[in-house]
Image (tube, coloured by chain):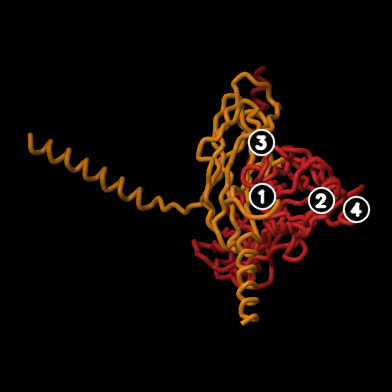
Chain colours: A orange, B red
């Protein structure tokens, strides 16, 4: 009987330990210290940072995003509270960046935002959570040198489109000729 | 004037005669053989293949540990001897960067157009592959063993991802005026991305004062805590520890968090209460919810 109680207690402790054991959260950044976002004066664009939760985690991660330093050019365009299931890759922090028109080429802005896990209140003396200060430089460049949008590779088959256009043209011309002949 | 004109006319009349005489003289001395069929033989040799295109590889968002990230791209090779002269089995590619493990591709024949063949390659990248510019190298051989190669570049994005375990920091029971009390257990930080401490930045902790759970006005100040990585754990209460400040993100100096495969990508954090205030009552003191301590990079 005593052994059973000990076993039950151990299992309960193990469950509690597992619930509090691991906390994970990630941020995937397209721009960072060595890879600045290049924008030209007067340009506005939205960039995306993907929030990650390792597929090996057993529960959803909750995160709160806040702008720490906008440098007067950035704002969070989308949501700020996220629930990220393990393995999800569709939770995106969208930052809208607008570079003023009257700014010299070569100027660098350092934009910073924070991402904090917002796990439910846990037992223990001190609760620990995961957090990041994500900063990225915005470098002002000439228009020709600005960062391009990510290119998605698609194999477009133009032959179908051309065929449709040709068929339509033939149909239109035939119709016009038919109408002309009819009126004659 | 008349004399000059007569001379020019005479010269013009004489030239054909002289010319005829000259060619007759040549014909007499050079005997040409009569025309006859001649074999013409031109050897068309093997032409080396060429790489005519490598598809653009979009910046790669790596998946966190333990997953790998499949990167798919194509390259097109041409052979003037015909597409069938390209040896499909030799189509190969890799991603490489100085100081990094080369990631080798698996390439398969995808399509053919004229004298060109396109191959689709898949490379599995690891979550800890360094962020920045990577080279993509492709090559192929023809049936005679002549080869072609080419290269391009693409970007691997920056992945910050850590996990902490356990998600609580605990201390043994302490009494007022106690000094240098070390935490009951350490926090294991696991790097699941390609961020590297200290190369890319520091491991940081933001701490908050511990408030009494019964009398919240009584606190153990955050500045009475020190934190250290594994290299300073033995002296966390003295020289090895970084002093915390309430609500401030502080870099943990004696901490390193390598990127790498499982087992080589962790750091252990140890904490110390340097002094328990003498004028606080007996109760539980904690920092939870909005005052939870933040471990990050």
Inspect this view and state whether residue A55 appears: yes
Left or right, residue B149 beside residue B71 = right
Q: Residue B171, which numbered label?
A: none
Query: Does label 1 or label 3 sit earlier along the sequence?
Result: 3
Kindly identify which residue carries mark 3: A112
**Residue B41, x across and y down, in percent:** 63, 69
Counting from the top left corner in percent of width and height, residue B244 is at 80, 42
Q: Is residue B176 left or right of residue A169?
A: right
Whether discs 2 and 3 lie on one chain: the answer is: no
The residue that disc 4 covers is B235
Badge 1: chain ID? A
> Is mark 4 in CB contact (under 8 Å) with mark 1?
no
> Residues at marks 4 and 1, common chain?
no
The relative height of residue B122 versus residue B21 in the rendered view (above or below) is below
- Graded by Cα atoms within 10 Å as few (under 14), some (14 to 19) or many (20 or more), the crowding at tag 2 reads some
Residue tagged by mark 1?
Answer: A130
The reply to whether label 2 and label 4 mark residues of one chain is yes
């Amino acid at each position: 009987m005593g052994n059973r109680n000990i076993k039950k207690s151990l299992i309960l402790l193990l469950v509690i330990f597992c619930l509090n054991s691991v906390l994970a959260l990630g941020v995937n950044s397209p721009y960072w210290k060595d890879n600045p976002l290049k924008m030209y004066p007067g340009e506005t664009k939205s960039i995306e940072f993907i929030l990650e939760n390792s597929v090996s985690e057993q529960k959803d991660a909750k995160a709160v995003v806040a702008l720490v330093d906008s440098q007067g050019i950035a704002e969070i365009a989308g949501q700020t509270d996220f629930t990220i299931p393990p393995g999800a890759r569709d939770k995106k922090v969208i930052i809208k960046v607008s570079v003023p028109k009257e700014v010299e080429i070569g100027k660098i802005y350092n934009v910073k935002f924070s991402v904090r896990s917002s796990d439910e209140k846990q037992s223990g003396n001190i609760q620990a959570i995961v957090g990041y200060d994500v900063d990225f430089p915005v470098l002002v460049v000439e228009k020709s040198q600005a960062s391009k949008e990510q290119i998605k590779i698609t194999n477009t088959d133009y032959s179908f489109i051309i065929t449709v256009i040709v068929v339509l043209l033939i149909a239109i011309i035939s119709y016009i000729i038919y109408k002309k002949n009819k009126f004659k | 004037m008349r004399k000059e004109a007569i001379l020019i006319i005479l010269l013009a009349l004489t030239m054909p005669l002289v010319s005829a005489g000259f060619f007759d003289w040549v014909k007499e001395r050079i005997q040409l053989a009569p025309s006859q069929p001649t074999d013409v033989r031109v050897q068309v040799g093997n032409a080396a293949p060429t790489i005519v295109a490598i598809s653009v590889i979009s910046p790669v968002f790596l998946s966190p540990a333990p997953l790998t990230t499949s990167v798919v791209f194509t390259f097109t090779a041409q052979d003037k001897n015909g597409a069938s002269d390209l040896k499909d089995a030799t189509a190969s590619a890799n991603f490489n960067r100085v100081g990094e493990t080369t990631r080798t591709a698996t390439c398969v024949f995808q399509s053919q157009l004229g004298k060109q063949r396109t191959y689709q390659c898949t490379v599995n990248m690891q979550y800890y592959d360094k962020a920045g510019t990577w080279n993509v190298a492709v090559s192929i051989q023809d049936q005679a063993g002549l080869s072609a190669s080419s290269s391009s570049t693409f970007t691997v994005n920056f992945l910050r991802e850590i996990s902490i375990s356990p998600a609580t920091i605990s201390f043994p029971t302490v009494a007022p005026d106690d000094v240098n009390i070390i935490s009951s257990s350490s926090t294991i930080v696991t790097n699941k991305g390609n961020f590297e401490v200290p190369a890319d930045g520091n491991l940081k902790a933001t701490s908050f004062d511990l408030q009494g759970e019964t009398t919240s006005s009584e606190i153990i100040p955050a500045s009475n805590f020190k934190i250290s990585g594994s290299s300073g754990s033995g002296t966390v209460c003295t020289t090895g520890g970084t002093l915390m400040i309430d609500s401030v993100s502080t870099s943990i100096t004696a901490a390193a968090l390598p990127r790498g495969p499982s087992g080589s990508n962790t750091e252990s954090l140890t904490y110390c209460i340097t002094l328990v205030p003498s004028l606080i009552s007996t109760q539980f003191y904690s920092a939870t919810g909005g005052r939870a301590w933040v471990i990050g990079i």
